Image (spheres, rainbow, N blue to C red):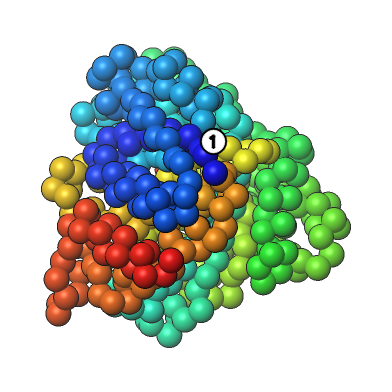
Amino acid sequence: MQATITVLSGDGIGTEVTAVAVALLQEIAALGGHTFTFQEALFGGCAIDATGDPFPAETQALCENCDAVLLGAVGGPKWSDPSAKVRPEQGLLRLRRHFNLFANLRPVRAYPMLARHAPLRADLLEGVDMLFVRELTGGAYFGARQEQGDGDTAYDTMIYTVAEVQRVARVAFRAAQARRKHLTSVDKANVLASSRLWQRTVTQVAAEFPEVQVEHALVDSFAMQLIRTPSRFDVIVTENMFGDILTDEAAVLAGSLGMLPSASLGEGTFGVYEPIHGSAPDIAGKGIANPTGTILSAAMLLRHSLNLPEEAAALEAAVQSALEVGARTADIAEPNLPTLSCADFGERVRAALRKVH
Ligand code: IPM
Ligand code: MN
């Protein structure tokens, strides 16, 4: 097949990790006889430096004319002055909003061989395999916000419509149906009106999916359960900001934030795929970042946007087998194993890919 992929490597380690994922996608294309065309565009802090805009019109046009976007990370100390008018993160929010990418899929699994990097006891990590479905275009991220007076008052608005909750709930129910048929909906219905609407709507949508068992959890209690009994969760659906916070928390289960991929999807097949880690300015340019989250994001891209499930599974299997035979970056280093650079880790995955093919 032929596909066009826009690469927004962004800032910090974004460039290093996307380079590895692109090389592996090229390998997949070569092995399977596909033609993938990659087009790079400015996004985030580097786009602010070059054009004054974190999501320039040219970048938007390239994203509109492709099958999927592979994204690295945005942001860094250079652009994080709180009084700055333009920030890299605004580009990310505009990208999500422009393409109506309302469902953010963040799978989290524990890797037995990385258990020593997780702060939890190994027995608690057994069988941890969950999927967060985070609402991505609503809530406090996009509600009315203002600073008032002499800057002594400020507000943000957490706002949801029934239609917004229904569509993301359906994504989560469908995912649960294809997995272990269990869905946890996380809210704060004992305090927030938007959460009561959320809970009521999820309960209504549940009637369409009789096979899926649904439970509602309050976000504070869920944050605790997530660490206390992580293996009992299958699919979790939650609003934008709760999802942002809880997925960083869940990342510790995988042993490193560097392991986690994500897919941001709308109604069609187009999607934006990015690791959940940020630009990591402290290690940027050193070539030591863990590209796993980006590689697994590329696998999600193959599955969701290009309808290449076998290629996706092959890439995931290659990551798994590279880890099994001891490929480790600095964040998941092992005393008796060599610590690989970002690029070398990618080469180990490539070697594994050739074997599984
Ligand atoms: C994420 C990030 C973003 C978010 C930031 C960079 C705006 O933390 O994708 O989780 O809050 O959504
Ligand atoms: Mn986040």
Q: Is residue 274 left or right of residue 155?
A: left
- In this rendering, the answer to whether 83 lies above or below 311 is above
- Is residue 248 something that shows in the picture? no
Q: Tell me the residue at 14%/79% (across/down).
A: 336
- Identify the image quadrant of the C terminus: bottom left
Residue 158 % position (x, y):
60, 35
Q: Tell me the residue at 21%/29% (across/down).
A: 78
Residue 2 % position (x, y):
52, 39
Nearest to the observer: residue 259 or residue 64: 64
Query: Tag 1: residue type?
Result: Asp
Residue 180 % position (x, y):
67, 72
Mark 1: which secondary structure? loop
Nearest to the observer: residue 188 or residue 64: 64
Q: Is residue 284 left or right of residue 262?
A: left
- Is residue 322 something that shows in the picture? yes
- Identify the image quadrant of the N terminus: top right
Residue 135 % position (x, y):
60, 44
Q: Is residue 210 left or right of residue 241?
A: right
Query: Which residue is disc 1 drawn over?
Result: 67
Q: Is residue 272 left or right of residue 346?
A: right
How crowded pointer 1 is (Cα within 10 Å; few <14, some 14-19, many 20+) is rated as some
Q: Tell me the residue at 33%/25% (across/down).
A: 42
Nearest to the observer: residue 315 or residue 13: 315
- In this rendering, the answer to whether 162 lies above or below 276 is above
Q: Tell me the residue at 85%/56% (across/down).
A: 208
- In this rendering, the answer to whether 259 lies above or below 161 is below
